[in-house]
Amino acid sequence: MNSEPLVSHILLELSAFLTTNASLQEVLKGILDLLSGVVQYESASIQLLDADGILNLTVGRGFKNMELARQNMRQLSSQLMKMKWNENQAIVVPDTYGDPLWIDRPGGETVRSWIGAPLRIRGQFPGCLSVTHATPFSFTQAMGEIVQVFANQASIPIENSRLFD
């Protein structure tokens, strides 16, 4: 699903979309929608750190119960913050059942494959973009790189929002 012409086309759409006057929430939702054109996911979300250093699910797609997803994110925040978030490299977990660091939460039993891509603003980690799938080995490292590109792009409107709001 991630052929080069399609990826190029979606990235052009993304760059044009980032120049609109949409609100931060609308832009982040749009980023997740465009990402679905190149990475087939079952759920996707962008989590941002709050003033207390807790990751909060800011926008999401594909969740059956958004409030449960938000609760799980708050509970998992400390474990996610312990992950090795390298400068610009997504974390790809091909099979969550086989990963000793994976922590199951209510409502997350069907997550079998996961990608988490760090957002970066001026060298800081303000949050991450993550995608999930119910089928193990649905995600490859190449898909992780694509998700990372979208995370990098998501950082732009987040930073602009912080500067201008």
Image (cartoon, rainbow, N blue to C red):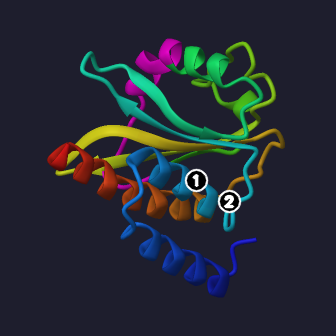
Q: CA distance from mark 2 to mark 1?
A: 6 Å
Q: Which mark is residue 36?
A: 2
The image shows residue 9, relative to residue 36, as above or below, that is below
Name the image quarter holding the N terminus.
bottom right
**What residue sits 15% from the left and 48% below the top?**
163
Q: For the view shown, which residue lies furthest in the bottom direction?
A: 5
Name the image quarter holding the C terminus.
top left
Which residue is at the front of the view, 21 or 25?
21
Residue 41 percent across, percent down from the top left:
72, 50
The image shows residue 152, relative to residue 15, as above or below, that is above
Residue 18 relative to residue 2: left or right: left
Q: Secondary structure at mark 2?
A: loop
**What residue sits 39% from the left and 36% below the top?**
84
User: What's drawn in magenta, residue-wise?
Assistant: 74-89
Residue 65 relative to residue 35: left or right: right
Residue 139 percent across, percent down from the top left:
70, 53
Q: Secondary structure at mark 1?
A: helix
Q: Amino acid at mark 1?
A: Leu
Q: Residues within 10 Å of mark 1 (few under 14, many from 20)?
A: many
Q: Label 1, on which residue?
A: 32
Q: Count how many numbered circles sit on residues in the image.
A: 2
Q: Residues within 10 Å of mark 2 (few under 14, many from 20)?
A: some
Residue 93 percent across, percent down from the top left:
63, 41
- Residues at circles 2 and 1 in contact by the CB criterion of under 8 Å: yes
